[in-house]
Image: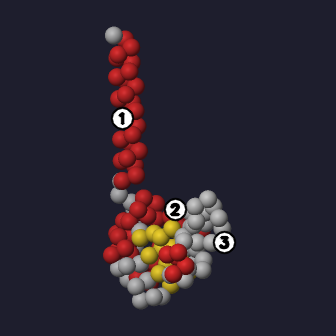
Amino acid sequence: MKDKILWIGVLLIIIAFVGLIIWQKNKPGEYDVLAQCLTDKGVKEYGAYWCPHCQKQKKDFGNSFRKITYIECGLPGGAKGGQTLECDEADINGYPTWVFPDGSRLEGPQTLQRLAEKSGCPLK
């Protein structure tokens, strides 16, 4: 009987932990309005998983980054020097690159304020 209670307790702890992780990933972000507006306007960010500037850009958005249209250019296995066909076709030469529907671009990490100004989206 004690073993059964112990296993039920362990199972409840695991369920609570998984629930906390899911809640943390899906909780609203500070910049959800900006991120959703960028996506709604057709703005795309091209980046690479190994790029430190791209990682910083993601960190700037926090939980709101999940609303950004992000295109991964990095090739599997960490090969630096090549990129995906989609990024080649979009003529991406550096990361991150923000591409706007009118064809204009912002290359390199951008402040959220700059992205808001360029897109006409509210910062918050």
Which is nearer the eye, 69 or 113? 69
The residue labelled by disc 2 is 59
The residue labelled by disc 1 is 15
Q: Looking at the image, what colour scheme do you see?
A: secondary structure
- Mark 1 vs mark 2, foreground winner is 1
Q: Counting residues from the N terminus, which is met first, the one under dot 3 or under dot 1?
A: 1
Vertical side of 26 occupied by 93: above or below:
below
Question: Which residue is pictured at 36% across the width and 53% down the height?
Answer: 26
- Residue 87, horizontal then vertical, whole percent: 52, 76
- Residue 106, horizontal then vertical, whole percent: 52, 82
Q: Counting residues from the N terminus, which is met first, the one under dot 2 or under dot 3?
A: 2
- Mark 3 vs mark 1, foreground winner is 3
The residue labelled by disc 3 is 81
Question: Which residue is pictured at 58% across the width and 65% down the height?
Answer: 75
Q: Distance between the residues labelled 2 and 3?
A: 24 Å
Q: How far apart are marks 1 and 2 (CA)?
A: 28 Å
From this viewpoint, is residue 81 visible? yes
Amino acid beneath label 2: Lys
From this viewpoint, is residue 122 visible? no
Residue 13: which quarter of the image?
A: top left
Number of marks: 3
Question: Which residue is pictured at 38% across the width and 83% down the height?
Answer: 120
- Mark 2 vs mark 3, foreground winner is 3
Amino acid beneath label 1: Ile
Which is nearer the eye, 78 or 51? 78
* SS for dot 2: helix
Q: If the image is split into quadrants, where does the C terminus sit?
A: bottom left
Question: Which residue is pictured at 49% across the width and 75% down the height?
Answer: 86
